[in-house]
Amino acid sequence: MVFCGRVNPTTGALDWVEEGEDYDYHQEIARSSYADMLHDRDRNEKYYQGIRSAVKRVKERGEKVIVLDIGTGTGLLSMMAVTAGADYCYAIEVFTPMAEAAVQIVKANGFGDKIKVINKHSKEVTVGPDGDMLQRANILITELFDTELIGEGALPSYEHAQQNLMQERWEAVPHRATIYALVVESRRLWGWNKLFPINLHQGLIHAPAEIQTCPGAPSVCDVQLSQLSPDDFKTLSDIMAIFRVDFSQQVSSATVIHPVKFTSVANGAAQVVLSWWDIDMDPEGTINCTMKPGWLYPTDHPVPWRDHWMQCVYFLPEERKVTVGEELCLTAYQDDYCVWYKLIKPGLEKSSSVSDERPVCHCGAHIIWNRTRFGELNDQGRMAKYKAAMSKILTPSSVCLCISDGSLLPLLAYSIGAAQVYTIESSSMSKQVMEKLLLTNHLKEAITVLQKAPESITAANLGDKKVSALIGEPFFTTSLLPWHNLYFWYSRTALSDNLAEGCTVFPMAASLYVLAVEFKDLWRIRSPCGICEGFDVSIMDAMIKKSLDFRESQEAEPHALWEYPCRALSQPVKVLQFDFTKTVPANDVKAEGSMSLVRSGRCHGIVLWMEYQLTEDISVSTGLLEVSEEKGDCQWYPHSKQGIFFLNSDLELGPSSTQTYSSVSYQLTFSPKLGDIQMSFVPNS
């Protein structure tokens, strides 16, 4: 057994949990994206076509075909190569459980004598009579890409393999990759990176200049851009090919600058770069696999779905006004692991006044707030609800204490007229960001920021006064699933001695809702593959299922469902209620029942979310906003992640139909001690 330190997101405590020795092993497999990739039929078909083409070219030169497959996974691409006529394949896989599965899969499909699985990193592979490879290869097959193309270290791996493991002349599948970019103005996307002026009860609240000029987090935003409406952005450039990587030539992982001149096609504010890539599987470019978003396809053309390769959103370091017809230069900076962009005047791309350093957050806000949180803070409709609700509960004599990370509610409370306002921040960085915000808006003396655990708050911290209004959104940076923000409830309980008699608690309550859904595509990440392009990979299915059954299949996982279309098959059901006006109970809170499936379709899973009752007549939802009457299409709150519980029956039997199942039974238990919710959902005939 091993002990794992795990933060209890609801209590904020570090719990030491005893786990089996295989815990990490099962976690890695259960959370892998192998099934998603194997369900990507477009990817598989294009790779197969490219491999056949490469094998044919080598054979036409009269050479023996030796393949090097880096990142083989299940061994699928190696099996394709042997089927296409390769004489021998070296399949490299660094992840031990997957390498062991690949050995079994290769053997079960009858390729054990022609494929050697090597459980090493490609940089550790040796060549020679006593090496891992008897000879160098003349076809290089890889699938080392991520949404950004090079974020998984593809370039260093290519560079090493080409220098040390390949013959002087080689073929590559894919043959080349091209990065594309589109410059746009988008208030929605820009609102994931900047804090807009906020209209409170009296006047505007402005973000510190340090936040507004900060380039933001260095990590790229990977997004299902197909779900972003073209109405959400204004195009300021044509689609540009930024740079290409030819994998049949020696690749370098050195930092490179790629300046691309263009003419602006519209007036606007250049804020964001949308980017994606495609790969040509052959030298002629006749076999192409593209990651372009769905709105670039013809209306009647099917759009391939994949979650392992999405599209990128890059934030420019600063907003720049552009006019139609203006000559500009979009400069991409590419190192061995990532890409970043700057928009400059033509001719200055190599100027010493333009830094080529990778963007790093210097304001702190992009470290404590992710893009979802920025979007939530900029949601004026949501803020209007808090404003209306707080105006009902606060008075000029209110002593107000806020419990939420990086919240604007303390500023709203002061704006409404509360006598004294305090706010608790969970970290020193969060405290610094809040103090900068207060200083910018001349409120540093009006609002007191405390960096203390709620149970450590004393009367002296509150000016020897009792709190008459305890407020929260609630939001905490440690929260992963919707109910993790119940940390507010624990904090309220810990603060009981500091609350005045009749203290108003805001929100007053919370409810957990569930909904049975059919996903358009997301079900693929949990569905077995069976036969893939004619090869039996069911050994991998069994391995993943075993790891899921270890724990993952009994838990919900967070997803931003605005990116993943689904249909409601049931009505939303309120399953658990939490009364914040009372302290956290000592005993478990349980709920059981069933929800009827009212629409036909395939029930893939259950969505869970929280709704907060601010006052008797005002509430805010972190989940379902609307369901269309006709088809049951769901609209989700875009600034929170929802929880998804995938049904076990789907994993074992494939998508289940509501013609077979009429309802789904549920059992949920909220454990105050564990600070989490245990759940079970079972379809009923």
Image (tube, rainbow, N blue to C red):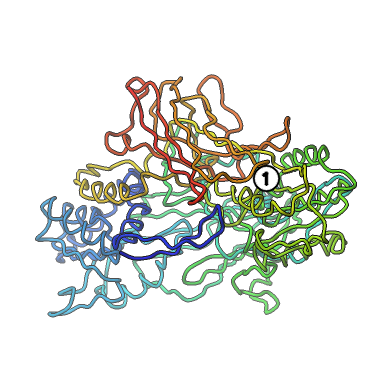
Find residue 602 and report its image quarter.
top left
Give whichever of 424, 480 is nearer the camera.
424
Image label count: 1
**Left or right: where does residue 630 sit relative to residue 552?**
right
Picture layout, residue 44 above or below residue 133: above
Q: Can residue 343 be spotted in the picture?
A: no
x%, y% of residue 122? 29, 71
Picture layout, residue 142 above or below residue 541: below
Q: Quarter of the image containing the N terminus? A: bottom left
**Left or right: where does residue 244 sit relative to residue 652?**
right
Q: Mark 1: which secondary structure?
A: strand
Give whichever of 432, 307 is nearer the camera.
432
Q: Can residue 250 be spotted in the picture?
A: yes
Q: Quarter of the image containing the C terminus? A: top left
Residue at 77%, 61% in the rendered image:
459
Give whichever of 600, 14 is nearer the camera.
14
Give whichever of 599, 45 is nearer the camera.
599
The residue that disc 1 covers is: 234
x%, y% of residue 435? 77, 65
Q: Tell me if mark 1 has few (under 14), some (14-19) or many (20+) residues whose alpha carbon lies within 10 angstroms of its own.
A: some
Picture layout, residue 635 above or below residue 264: above
x%, y% of residue 279? 40, 55
x%, y% of residue 641? 55, 45
**Left or right: where does residue 587 sit relative to residue 614?**
left
Question: Disc 1 marks which amino acid?
Answer: Lys
Picture layout, residue 128 above or below residue 522: below
